[in-house]
Each structure stands twice: as structure tokens, then as C-alpha cells.
Image (tube, rainbow, N blue to C red):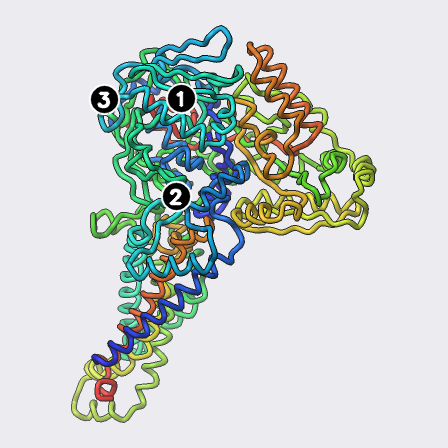
Amino acid sequence: MNVLNSRPRRLRAGLAAAVTAGVLLLAGCGGGAAPSANTAADAGPPVRGGNLIVAVPTDPQSLDMVANPGQVTAHIGNLLYEKLFEVDKEFAARPMLVETYETSSDRLTYTFELRKGVTFHDGSPLTAEDVVASLQRWLKSHVTGQQVAPDVVTLKAKGDDTVLLKLKEPRYPLIDELASPGAEIYAAKNLEGVPATGFTDKGAIGTGPYKLASWDIGRQVVLERYGNYKSRADQDWGGQAGAKQAYLDTITYKVVADQDALVNGLQTGQWQHAMPGNDQYTALKENASIVVGNVAGANQNVIIPNHAKGSKFADVRARQALNLLMDKPAMNAATGGGPDLTAAVGAMVSEDNPALYSTVGDEVYKQHDPAKAKELFAQAGVKAGDTVRIVTSNSYPQFAQWAVLLQDQLAQIDIKTKIDTYDFPTMLGTINKDPGGWDLTTLFFNAALTSPSQMPAVTLGAFNGSASPEIAALVREYNAVTSPVQAKEVMDKLQALVWEQLPVITLSQSRLYAAWSPELKGYDGFYRVFWNSWLKR
Amino acid sequence: MAALLLRRLRDLVLILLIVGTMMFFVVRLMPGDPAMAILGPTARPQDVEALRQSMGLTGSLWNQYLSWLGNVVQGDFGTSITYHASVIPVVAEHFLPTLTLAVISTAVSFVVAVVVTFWNAVAPRNPVAALLTRLSGLGMAIPDFWIALILVLVFAVTLRWFPSSGYVSILSDPAAAAPTLVLPVICLVIGQSALFILTLRESVLGELPQTYLRTARVKGLSERQVMLGHVLPNALMPLVTQLGSNFAMMMGGIVIIESIFVIPGLGSLLLGAVFTRDFPLVQGVTLFVALMFVLVNLLVDLSYALLDPKVRVS
């Protein structure tokens, strides 16, 4: 699921598309802790009908989940499209469009048998050709698929209902990666000639329980129940897996960029669900007429040192010095929301995903020793009086606040700073234009991931020059494992290596939250997924 | 009149060409790469380049400009990078909310200004009329976003008389649209009518000592007839100029009001387009706003001729 979701203050509207798309690393979604108010016995039996109104911070701008990895696109897309596998509330992949699958003894060949009777919203049946066309596009154009692509030898249809996928090398997380955003299955005919910018609303046809009814650009997207949806027969596994019942007639996603308007609309019943920014959390929590709860996943808040030649942080000792210098609790306080929304951990993956969550290296994360930092900086050639160049963005206020706090902390050891604050696209453009012209930047990433190859530590190499043969070797080692126990061991090693090489320096994990009307029942705090939810009037 | 129209049409083409050309180069001089903004920091350089190419952002700037100009002449303003749709329908979609707000708030402000000013002129000792005139200074001084927040707090969140935000097209459902328009229109009317009152008051005060009014009174006209029949038409000219200028400004978008009341107008569209470096959309909106400015000014000029016989004669 997508990353950037804190929509702190006003005028975040236009930024959201750029920022979400920009910082996103896609991954699966997981189930968060749903508050008791929502799962209480008073929910009663499900009620069919009604229109759920959901406030979203931006127009999705595209409903193509390969071309647009933005949060709103992903959240709406989850109801429109399905993948071969979907993640449950603990990020474990479970079959969705696949009925059964087999892996050869050498773990190189996967045979997927598709469920029969599944149809797209235009009535056409799901076939193996649709799966092949969709996955080929994913392998070519999506950031996760691109990580998988080098291992794929062939991907082909065998009859109408069987898909064969042959690998060059065994890939342990393949199924998890097929359950991550971007691997949705579209009708092959709708993918012909689609440009890199993605398909239009006419291509927004999937096999999900809701179909696109209308889309007023900049105002709202309306989904309506797909009458011929064929649900899995198994139970609701939470997250995106298992049986799906479309109780609601329609779901209207209204574009509400302004945070005050978002909260006012919730209070006055104009919409029944929103994911406001951290600044609104306390006030909403105190409002008895609104249910507030964490949703799945988290964001990983990071300071990114530039490893490229010309940067003050090309030397690992400078990065280690910075980690020692940073007063992380003070910087986390600037993120907002308090301890309910900020977890002081150095993990790269949300704790909602126990298979990948690792706190190895947290002793490094917790170190704070400015005197030792000064020594290490000196060893790395960064002396008193030198100037560190920080490129940050005011699109997300916490970014600029972290930069100012860093400036203060560096000043305490007599290192000067030059902070350049831009809007988000300009920040990215500035960094991209002059790879050696900056030292530090600020970002946050999705921590709801399903495999190491989706982690910023692995994928950020071209951005800050942090690509490392040791990290790449560990990713390969992870791909070669055969059991969850082995996978966890490698994940721990990877996490430890990240704290050694510091491709990014983690500040914290921000928990996401949603606020919704007590009328909304059955909602399990899984982003903006509303099948198996209903309105109790 | 025909000559005036022809002259203005010639100016219109020139202005649009100049504005369009300037915007084309200005947006491309802005730092920030739309392809990078869409794909994010983890994208491979070759993918960023491929997307840039599919957006038509490669090749020399001059060739890009000629290509853009050639398309514009044929009515093709390009495809929005973020909306994946032709620029014209996207702009049209966002124009109606802004136009609705601008027309209603300008009309209401005009009526309020005329009524208050002439009430004050006819009954200078009426305390309410005097108070309203004096309050106009305050109305201009209070920022509209503050008024908006107070109105939302009182009338939407507390009293629940009106929705706190939202937009319904007045063309598709006027009854549903009315409640959503009340608070944003009030916000705009407070500042605008205050400005109009002050403008009209100055103008009226300038007309009152004129000798033609004495003649009118000597002819036996009532004070109301004098005010409405003689003072108003003469005093309206500066107000019409002000009104045209204000209206054209609003056509460029009422960003804060649109943002607070979640109205998908031109202002929020342009703001979003700038932040996402949606070059075709920025250029399209800018050209459209320039067009509106020229057309509104043309209408103002034509209205002079209607209001003032001297202009018609000259």
C-alpha cells in the first residue's frame, strides 16, 4: 500500500499527488488494530444498501495502479481490481484469483490455476492471457515488478485457466510480491497501447467487488456494487484476502484537501470516513461522536544521506556520526500525533507484518552521543566550520522541521548548514539534477512491505548512491531461502546491515489512523477498503 | 462599436499569444521534473526518461514550443499529465464552480453596494445605513479565510444550518447546490461589497454637488427619482470598472475559499497543476484565465457605452 498519507495542513491538495507518487514504495496492505467501538456486538447483522461517503485528500488522477502508485489510486483500486494473491491483515499472501498453485521441486516453475467463473466488470471472463498481459506490464513498468523481472525466464498462458511462470533462480518472496500493489490483473484488451502515463478511466475495469460508476475529475469518484462479483468461498482473512461481500450499494470518494474541512465534514456527517493528518488526531480522539483507530501499516520516517561523490556523507563514518548526533526523540516530536502515532523504532517494515518486522540494530538506532559524533565527523573529514547542504520540502511540514532540528544539532558541534526548502517536485528535481550537490534530504516511505526488494534501503541506490553489493547479496540470500525461519534470519541480517551502512537513517515509524462515523460497521481499519462493511442507520 | 469589437479581438489574439508563450517558457524554467515527481525517488533513470518522452518533454525547447503552438492553433491544448485527459474538458470542469461563485457573489455584492450607498444618500441620518457604510472599512480589512472559518464554525459545525463544505453543480441540481453556496458566497460578498460600497460612495459624493441634480430637483423629481434616475447611472462607471476587475480576478480562482469549502474550482486546479508540474494544465488554465480577463474587460468597455451616452457618441 502506498505511503505518504499524513496530510498535515491546508493547501496540501495539489501536492498530494506529487508527493504520494514521489515517495511511494508500494507494498501490500495489512490489517491494523481496529478500535473496539467498531467491532462491538452492537454492530448487529450486516445491512445491505446505502452510500458510504469517504473523504480523500486528492483526486486519484489515474486509476492505473502501475502508472500511478499514489495512495488514493491504490485505495480505490483495491476495490476495483484483484491480484492473483492478496495479503491478509498480517501481510501474508493468500490466493485470490488463483484457485490453486504448484511449485516445482526445484522451486523454479510455478503453475497457477485460476478460479473459474470470475468476470471483469464488462462481463468478459478472466483468462490466463489477461494474467500474462498484466504481469508482463508489472514486470516491465512497476518498481516491484522490475525487481522481480531479472529472475523471470518465461511467463505464459497454458489454456484459458493456467499460467506458467518459470524463474532463473528460486525466489522465496515471489508470492508475496505477486500480492503487492501494482500486480493487479486487468483485461488484456485494455492494456494494448497503454502509454507510460497509464490508461484512462475506460481501462479501470477489474474483477473486484465494486466497479467504477462515475468520476468527476477533482470532485469525486463513485463506485457501485458489481452484481456479478464472484467472492471466494473461504472466510474473510482480513486485509484484502478471503471472502468479500459488497454490502454497500455505492461508495463515494469525495476529494477534500483541506484538513479543517475534512474534520468539519466528519463532525457534521457529510462523510463517514477520512484519514486526517497527525495534527487533527488529538481533537478527533476526544470527540465521542467519531471513532478513531489505527489503520494498517506505517510510514518509515527517514533522513537520507547522500552517498555520492562530492557529498559530506560519502564516507560511512560521517553517516554513523550523523546517527550519533541526531536527537531522534526531539525530531520525532515534530512529526506530530504523539506516541499513539509515532513508534520509536528503527525497523524498515511495519510491525503489522511480523514476517518482516525486525528491530535488530535498534541499539544503533538509539545511540545519541554528540561528542563521539564530532570525533567521527573529524575522521570522515567533516570539520568544524564545514557546511552541510540539506535539501528539504515544505510540502510536508515535518520535513522542514526535521531539517531545522538537524541544523541546530549540527551547530552544537560547530558544523554549519545550508537548508534549501522547496516544494516536493522541486526537491526531487534538485536532487536528481545534481547528484553530488546535496548532503542530506528528508522523506518518508511506506513501511507496509511484503519483500526486501521493496525496501528503500534496496531500491534507493540510484537516488542517493547507496547501492551496495553487501545489501544486494543479502537480498539474493533472502530470495534463496526456503522457510519463514530462514527468511526471518536473513531479514535480521539485512536490518543490521542497514544500520551499519546507513543508506537511510530512520527516525521513527508513523502509525496511520482513520476517523469514521459510528454508523460504519464491519470496517477493520484496513486503509480505505470497504467490502464486508456496511452502514447501520 | 464594431470597430471596438474588432480591435479587442485583435488584442485578444495578441495577448493570448504573449501569455501562452511566456507561460510555456516560464513553467519549463521552473525547477522540478514532472516525470520524477510522478515516479518518485526510487524510479530507475531509464523509466524517468521514458515517461518524460511520453509526456513530450524531450527534445529542444524550441521544437517543443513550436509543436505546442501548432497544436494550440488547431485547438489542441494538450493532455493533462495528472488527469490523463484533454486540458480543455478539465478546465471546463473546474470553470463552472468558479464562475458560479463569481457571478453570484458579484451580483449580490453589487446589489448590496447600491442599496446601502443610496440608502445612506437618501437617508443620511438613518443610523443603520450609516453603520453599514462605516462597517465597509472593516469588511475590507478582515481576511476572507478568517470569515470563512468563523462562518463554518458557527453555521456549519455548531448550528448545522449549512454544510461545512462541498460542491453541487447549480446546473444539475439547483436545490442541492444552494445550501453549499451560502457560506462561500457570504465570505466573498463581505469583502467585495465593502469595496464596492466605498467605491460607489466616493463616486456618489462626487456627483451630488453637480448642478444637473439641482435642475432635476427643480423639475419636481423626488429625491428617489433623482438618485436612481440621475445619480446612479453617472456614479456607476467607477463601480463597473471595479466590478469587472474583481470579477476577472475571481475567474483566476479563489484559492483560499475554494480550499476551505472544498470547491473544485480553477484556483485549486491551477495550484495543484503547479505543484505537480503539470505543464499542459498550467498553460491551459493560464490561457483560459487570460481569455477571461480580456473578455471581461471587453464587456466592461461595452457597458460604458450602454451606461454613458457620451461614450457612445465618441
Residue placed at 16% from the left, 89% from the top? Answer: B220
Q: Earlier in the sequence, mark 3 or mark 2?
A: 3
Chain ID for label 1?
A
- Residue B74 vs B244, above or below: the answer is above
C-alpha span from label 2 to label 1: 25 Å
Task: Identify the residue position indicated by label 1 in the image.
Answer: A240
B160 and A309: which one is in front?
A309
- Residue A1: x and y in percent read 46, 29
Q: Amino acid at mark 3?
A: Asn
Q: Residues within 10 Å of mark 3 (few under 14, many from 20)?
A: some
The chain to which mark 3 is attached is A
Mark 1 element type: loop
Which label belongs to residue A228? 3
Q: Position of residue A486 (x, y in %)?
A: 60, 11
- Answer with left or right where residue A342 lies relative to residue A109: right
Q: What subunit carries mark 2?
A: A
Where A274 sits versus A14, above or below? above
Residue at mark 1 shares a chain with residue at mark 3? yes
Percent across and percent down for residue A152 are 47, 21
Which residue is labeled 2 in the image? A256
Q: State the residue in front, B91 or A334.
A: B91
Asked which secondary structure carries label 2, the reply is loop
Q: Residue B258, relative to residue A30: is it above or below? A: below
> Of label 2 and label 1, which has the lower sequence position?
1
Q: How many marks?
A: 3
Q: Estimate how packed mark 2 is, as few (under 14), some (14 to 19) or many (20 or more) residues with alpha carbons within 10 Å.
A: many
Would residue B160 be found to the left or right of residue B61 on screen?
left
